[in-house]
Amino acid sequence: MTRPPRPPDAVEDLLRRHAPQVLGALVRRYGHFDAAEDAVQEALLAAAGQWPGQGIPDNPRGWLIKVASRRLTDALRSESARRLREEAQMRLLPRDAFTTPAPDVPRAPAEDDTLTLLYLCCHPDLSPASQVALTLRAVGGLTTAEIARAYLVP
């Protein structure tokens, strides 16, 4: 059973009053403060959009807790599924895919990261001045102040 629609200010006051209680209930139940806070915000947005037109539920705090709990459960499941997908993808990659070879091991030019960076800095869409400045910064290791002095910028 819902109460008749109320003006938005009354709904806002009600939401402000119940928000800390809902957050406390979710943190106690799930233990994830940041995720609970996000879920409570989503529940408050849903209530702010729905309650002024459809009326306030008989137990607004319970409604908010239920909606926020469902949003939090969905978020935690989604995060868990994402993590499992990433771990499965990592198992498909060769073990040495993310390790750097020893410095004395010669590398093919196609594997030279510095050369790749140099090519990126000299992309034809960049102006020549930008290419030089970016190359000096990224590949040459110069600071912005040193590059400005080289261009005679005070």
Image (cartoon, grey):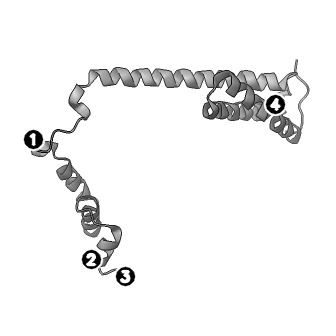
Q: Quadrant of the C terminus?
A: bottom left
Q: Quadrant of residue 105?
A: top left
Q: Earlier in the sequence, mark 4 or mark 1?
A: 4
Q: Amino acid at mark 3?
A: Pro
Mark 3 / mark 1, whichever is N-terminal: 1
Q: Position of residue 54 (x, y in %)?
A: 83, 27
In the image, taking residue 39 as reference, residue 106 lies left or right, namely left
Three-letter code, disc 1: Val
Q: Is label 3 or label 1 in front?
A: 1
Query: Cβ–Cβ below 8 Å for labels 4 and 2?
Result: no
Q: Are marks 3 and 4 in contact (CB under 8 Å)?
A: no
Instruction: Give whichever of 92, 2 is nearer the camera.
Output: 92
User: In the picture provided, is 73 more to the left or to the right than 58?
Assistant: left
Please rate how many residues cluster around mark 3, counting C-alpha atoms within 10 Å: few if below 14, some from 14 to 19, many from 20.
few
- Disc assigned to residue 148: none
Estimate the x, y position of residue 31 in percent, counting from the top left. 63, 26
Chain-order first, disc 4 or disc 2: 4
- Residue 154's disc is 3
Q: CA distance from mark 3 to mark 1?
A: 43 Å
Nearest-to-viewer mark from 3 and 4: 3
Out of 130 and 22, give the one closest to the viewer. 22
Q: State the residue position of label 4.
A: 51
Q: Residue at x 24, y 53 (%)?
A: 120
